[in-house]
Amino acid sequence: MPSPPRMIRVVPGEIDARQLTTRLVLPTTAQPAWPPFRRVSESIANRERHLPAHAHEGEEVLTYVTEGVAAYQVDAGSAELVPSGGARLLIAPSRVGHRVSPGPGGTVRWFNLVVALPPGTAGAPRKLALPESPTPREEDNVSVRSLVGPGAPMASLGGLECDELSFSEESTTFRKVGRERRAVVYALSGRGAVDQQPIEAGEAAFVEGVPGTAVRGTPGFRTVLATAPR
């Protein structure tokens, strides 16, 4: 398979407030598709406006809580509390339902990523847990927390890798992507740049056709970088 042309594109989020407040960066008018990524968003829910139960099939679903406490439920099982910094990875080769609701405190904010599993993937649904933020490591003066992938607390079935990057000072880090993979860089807070293209909270950079990408941040810049085989 030939390598794709180099592409780095920054797109703003679109607000969807039909059921709860969601900033959606995929799919949108600006970025309608980015296989194998099916959805990239950030949501805020409270007691009055929350996400109803819904199903997934042939997908992996990452739920990463960034503020507050979430009540996370799979099918008819008991809801479990996921604190800020915690995450769940739902691997769903077959159909399974789940729900994310506000826990104690009444308001919760989380990052959501849905990735298609490779065709023919079989097996029963299962859930992996990241109970709290893993111990960060320092790389290029940047705090890096590995959420999914080799060496991370949660292992993907479809090759998803995901890190959170936090900047306490102005610096630049070079992150591996791979020419046969696609990447999404979503800004949770602050301002920075992806290969010199400015990006700020609520925006995402879509990257492919490169061995890696330079991510620059100013103090307070916090971003999630996810890659997956195209």
Image (cartoon, rainbow, N blue to C red):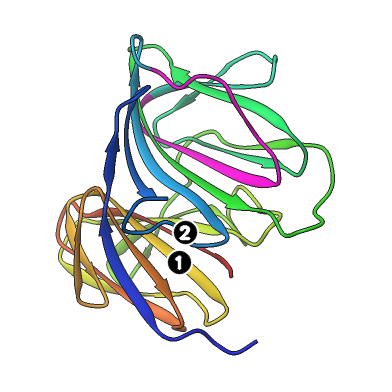
Residue positioned 31% across, 58% down in the render? 30
How far apart marks 1 and 2 lie (CA) works out to 13 Å
Q: Quadrant of the N terminus?
A: bottom right
Asked whether 65 falls inside the magenta stretch, the response is yes
Between 53 and 138, the residue placed more toward the observer is 53
Residue positioned 74% across, 34% down in the render? 95
Circle 2: residue type? Ala
Report the predominant secondary structure element of the magenta stretch: strand
Residue positioned 55% across, 87% down in the render? 3
Q: Residue under circle 1? A: 183
Image position, residue 201 (x, y; %): 21, 49
Asked whether 58 falls inside the magenta stretch, the response is yes
Q: Quadrant of the C terminus?
A: bottom right
Identify the mark at residue 33; answer none if there is no mark.
2
Identify the mark at residue 165; answer none if there is no mark.
none
Who comes first in sequence, dot 1 or dot 2?
2
> Looking at the rendering, which quadrant does residue 174 occupy?
bottom left
Other residues around mark 1 within 10 Å, as few (<14) / some (14–19) / many (≥20): many
For label 1, the SS is: strand
Between 18 and 159, the residue placed more toward the observer is 18
> Looking at the rendering, which quadrant does residue 91 occupy?
top right
> Looking at the rendering, which quadrant does residue 217 occupy?
bottom left
Front of the two marks 1 and 2: 2
